[in-house]
Image (cartoon, grey):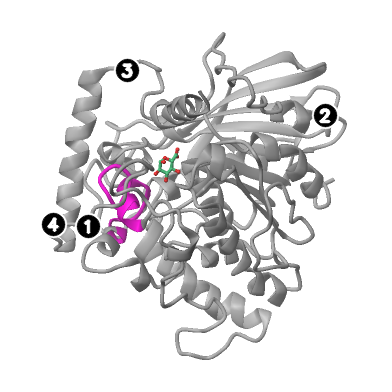
Amino acid sequence: MKNLFKIFALLMIVLFPVNAQFVFDPQKMDSIRKSTNEDYRLMLQMLGIDSTRPGPSGNPKDHNAANTNESKAATYTSLPDPLILNDGRKVKDAETWWKKRRPEIVEYFDREIYGRVPKNVPGVSWEIVKTKEDTIGNIPVVVKELLGHVDNSSFPSITVDIQLTLTIPADTKGPVPIAMEFGFILPPGFKLPEPPPGVPKDPNWQQLVLEKGWGYAILVPTSYQSDNGAGLTKGIIGLVNKGEHRKPDDWGALRAWAWGASRALDYFETDKSVNAKQVIIEGLSRYGKAAIVTMAYDQRFAIAFVGSSGAGGVKILRRNYGEQVENLASSSEYHWFAGNFIKYAGPLKSNDLPVDAHELAALCAPRPIFISSGSFEVEGGWVDAKGMFLGGAYASPIYELLGKKGLGTYDFPPIETALTNGEIAFRQHKGGHTTGPNWPEFLKWADKYLE
Ligand code: GCU
């Protein structure tokens, strides 16, 4: 029963972004699959790669199931040191980090992993489409529905509008902190299914946020960049490329989604009810990856709450546990990344990556990040809770260099232990593929940093 719920929840997450209308249209899905395969084939051609290695299966019963045995996980031979410059010298002060080492790491992530945001991305003008009053829990709120219209004068056949809603307590006096989630806006009347008996219901995070006197926002990533390879010639990536296919170091969906979060933050800077210096970015799974990418690249974000981000997020990519680089580089997930990333499932291997996930976490320093995971029993091993913990642990020296506290340990803690004494926090809750049960601990920790 628990497993059925898990599969259903995963399906919802995987299907919704692809098909925002909640309609399973086989013809549409088939045409997406075909265009995706064509885009993937073209990228392999550009990279001069004939074939890629297949990744392991996410189904633990399969003969080629992903490894979930810890004794086989850490076979990698190299883990890049964020404190060693490309020329071999050691970073000993904050200035060398900011001026030399950080830009080196950013360049690797740009070129090899997430891709570059083009210089000529057009501007966005925000429109408040609707403002309404509502009550959430017992709290009166004001809800603004917004659209960010992207200037498409350079290629009018592609229209891009960023969907965002902002909910603020009605009786607030000054500007408030905002928790912004990468998510989807449910159609009126739609309710997510209740968990089966024995699995506790997630707390209502929106209500918890409002009770603190803060506001929240939902940003819909798929409103401006689809969650599939077929969409790479459309959305914001396609608009900038005038409908053409990507070059190998062009941005993938994760950076595009993060770009949209930055544009939402631009809007917050103009809204007097929002304290734009105190914006939290949160997401789960592929949107957990998007949350850490957003935080790493845009230093205006105050705090990140990174839910079950797994491979491509804060999980150490070199670990042979759960999802692997080969899965990410396959035709169903490569669109999240730069085309160049596919090389690591072809001629190269994860050991050859010039950077790993701890360095993505390090790019967030000194700002606070909370790394969240579900349990092995309910969520499964695919996301690799320990791999995500290590992503935070190995980023700690950079936080310490900048005068902050890192995770404080390299020993993976027992479940439900909140490591929340420093600017890198970690907690594995007992539930499944959700940030839900970690919201109360997250808010307690985040409260130290926000008004
Ligand atoms: C798949 C994928 C993960 C991703 C997840 C999700 O499981 O392999 O990398 O995080 O989907 O977003 O739901």
Q: Which residues are magenta?
A: 325-341
SS at circle 2: helix
Residue matched to label 3: 24
Residue matched to label 2: 211
What's the CA distance linking mark 4 and mark 1? Answer: 16 Å
Q: Which of label 2 and label 1 is nearer to you? A: 1
Residue matched to label 4: 45
Tell me: 337 left or right of 378.
left
Amino acid found under the numbered disc labelled 2: Glu
Q: Earlier in the sequence, mark 2 or mark 1?
A: 1
Within-10-Å neighbours for mark 4: few <14, some 14–19, many 20+: few
Q: Earlier in the sequence, mark 2 or mark 4?
A: 4
Q: Earlier in the sequence, mark 4 or mark 1?
A: 4
The residue lying toward the viewer, choosing from 191 and 131, is: 191
What's the CA distance linking mark 3 and mark 4? Answer: 32 Å
Amino acid found under the numbered disc labelled 1: Arg
Snapshot quadrant of residue 140: top right
Does mark 2's beta carbon lie closer than 8 Å to ligand 1?
no
What's the CA distance linking mark 3 and mark 2? Answer: 37 Å
Q: Quadrant of ligand 1?
A: top left
Q: Position of residue 446 (x, y in %)?
A: 77, 48
**The C terminus appears in which quarter of the rendering?**
top right
Q: Position of residue 135 (x, y in %)?
A: 76, 14
What's the CA distance linking mark 2 and mark 1? Answer: 49 Å
Q: Which of label 1 and label 3 is nearer to you? A: 1
Does mark 4's beta carbon lie closer than 8 Å to ligand 1?
no
